[in-house]
Image (cartoon, rainbow, N blue to C red):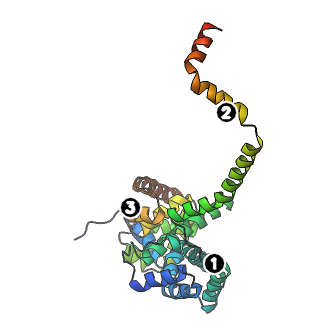
């Protein structure tokens, strides 16, 4: 996780925006839009990225008076981006209809091959990334929004428990418990999906 | 030499790679203009007031009510009869012992 401190430029721009210069916000938008998009693209469906990125910057704009500059603007914005993703999934999961279908035969064969293979590299070189992503999305869709966020941050991206807790605004104990449970649930889902 | 990985470790490594290798997303100028349009619609930010400012606001908000209350009480005292109240006060101030004894004796 980036642990930058606020550059004097960022703090000055934030001060200008809070003082009423709305157009100064465009500098922050230009500087950090790629950073926000990088965070969102891993966590959201492609067709939702642009709209959610807009929401992130609007939330950031409205929250600027609460920015204290201690942890850096980039870090502060990352927290807003991650929490916006969490809100997206919570909303999405409330209205979704979970498909009962299990994995296709092609995916099941892929899973079997992946577990039997001794090297992730050799398996990956076979050009089966698309299947990997589809299976991952299938499994993530069967978790709760909370489990999904923790699993992505800790298991797939390698953030520490404390970093994930800071990003989500949860306690460390909560992240630890959810991380353990969600990992177990993912393994169970994938194991059950394999042909017997 | 590294020990051989278990099936689930290999799977985790593959899924992690797949997760990280999503295509890059780029947004155009229109997207940026769209965000700025929404920001301009929201207008300038109202800074969060400090505790002293909030207290000051509260005092000024309550000031008309307080003025009305003072005015009302003044009018009430002006129109009400003070004489009887004053006499009772005098009775208490001048003869409290007698009054207490008389009450005690049931007189």
The percent position of residue A192, horizontal first and vertical second, equals 52, 56
**A167 or B85, nearer to the observer:** B85
Q: Which residue is mark 2?
A: B86
Location of residue A10 by image quarter: bottom left
Please tell me the numbered disc located at residue A51: 1
Q: Residue at x 53, y 78 (%)?
A: A18
Pointers 3 and 2 in contact (C-beta within 8 Å):
no
Give me the residue at 32% from left, 65% from top: B5
* SS assignment at label 1: helix
- Label 1 and label 3 in one chain: yes
Give the residue number, with chain letter if any, for mark 3: A161
Distance of label 1 from label 2 (alpha carbons): 76 Å
Dot 3 alpha-carbon crowd within 10 angstroms: few under 14, some 14 to 19, many 20 or more:
some
Q: Chain of mark 3?
A: A
Q: Residue A12: x, y in percent?
A: 45, 84
Left or right of A55 on screen, residue A194: left
């Amino acid at each position: 996780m980036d642990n930058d401190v606020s550059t004097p430029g960022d703090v000055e721009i934030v001060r200008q925006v809070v003082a009423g210069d709305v157009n100064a916000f465009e500098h922050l938008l230009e500087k950090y839009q790629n950073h926000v998009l990088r965070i969102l693209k891993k966590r959201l469906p492609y067709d939702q990225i642009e709209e959610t990125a807009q929401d992130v910057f609007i939330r950031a704009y409205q929250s600027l008076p609460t920015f204290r500059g201690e942890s850096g603007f980039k870090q502060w914005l990352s927290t807003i981006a991650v929490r916006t993703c969490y809100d997206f999934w919570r909303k999405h999961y409330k209205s979704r209809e979970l498909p009962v279908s299990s994995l296709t035969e092609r995916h099941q064969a892929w899973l079997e091959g992946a577990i039997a293979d001794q090297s992730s590299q050799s398996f990956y070189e076979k050009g089966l990334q698309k299947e990997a992503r589809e299976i991952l999305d299938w499994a993530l869709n069967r978790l709760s929004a909370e489990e999904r966020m923790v699993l992505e941050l800790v298991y797939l991206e390698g953030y520490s428990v404390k970093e994930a807790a800071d990003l989500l605004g949860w306690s460390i104990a909560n992240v630890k418990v959810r991380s353990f449970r969600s990992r177990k649930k993912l393994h169970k889902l994938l194991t059950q999906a394999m042909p017997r | 030499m590294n020990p051989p990985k278990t099936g689930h470790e290999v799977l985790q490594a593959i899924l992690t790679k797949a997760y990280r290798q999503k295509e890059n997303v780029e947004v155009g100028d229109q997207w940026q203009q769209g965000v700025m349009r929404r920001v301009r619609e929201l207008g300038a930010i109202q800074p969060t007031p400090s505790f002293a400012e909030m207290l000051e606001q509260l005092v000024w908000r309550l000031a008309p009510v307080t003025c009305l209350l003072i005015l009302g009480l003044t009018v009430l005292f002006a129109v009400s009869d003070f004489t009887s109240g004053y006499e009772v006060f005098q009775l208490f101030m001048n003869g409290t012992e007698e009054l207490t004894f008389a009450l005690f004796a049931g007189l």
